[in-house]
Amino acid sequence: MPKDLKKYYTIPATPEEVYAAITNPVTIELWTGEPAEMSTEPGTEFSMWDGSISGKNLEFEPGRKIVQQWYFGEQEEPSIVTIKLHPDKHVTSAELRHTNIPDEDYKDISEGWDESYFGGLADFFLVN
């Protein structure tokens, strides 16, 4: 059975800065250290970590929200990632919702969000 994940993260930057960091392929490469393909055009394909993560961009609200479909092989129901960005004093509160994660991938995906994705993003802003 596929699983859903909902988590919250704090990033030491404004929502606009965080949004730019997760939608600009040049910036994505800076904080991931890997090639990335990204566009803010709905319907376009994306790829991060040199193809380890790929999917389709569905919806964008600059500085506020990103919705993507992530690909996991031949899944019947799409796996949808929604990231909402909220200003919180001098930081951003990021709300993550990831639906329909294949059971066998759940642990790796959950840890990946914590360590690589939002962990890498927070480290990027702490250093810069």
Image (spheres, rainbow, N blue to C red):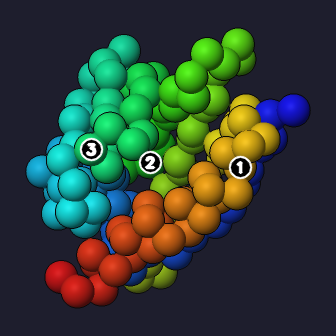
**Mark 2 residue type:** Arg
Q: Quadrant of the C terminus?
A: bottom left
- Quadrant in the rendering for residue 123: bottom left
Residue lying furthest right in this view?
1
Q: Residue at x 60, y 64 (%)?
A: 111
Q: Can residue 49 be spotted in the picture?
A: yes
Task: Give me the C-alpha separation between circle 2 and circle 1.
Answer: 26 Å
Rendered location of residue 113, percent (x, y): 54, 60
Above or below residue 18? Residue 56 is above
Label 2 or label 1, whichever comes before in sequence order: 2
Q: Residue at x 23, y 86 (%)?
A: 127
Q: Residues within 10 Å of mark 2 (few under 14, many from 20)?
A: some
Judging depth in this view, the residue of 55 and 14 nearest the camera is: 55
Q: Secondary structure at mark 3?
A: helix
3 and 2 marks in contact (CB < 8 Å): no
The residue that disc 1 covers is 106
Q: Can residue 92 be spotted in the picture?
A: no
Above or below residue 116? Residue 84 is above
The residue that disc 2 covers is 64
The residue that disc 3 covers is 50
Judging depth in this view, the residue of 9 and 72 nearest the camera is: 72
- Image depth: mark 3 or mark 2 in front: 3
**Mark 1 residue type:** Tyr
Judging depth in this view, the residue of 38 and 101 nearest the camera is: 101
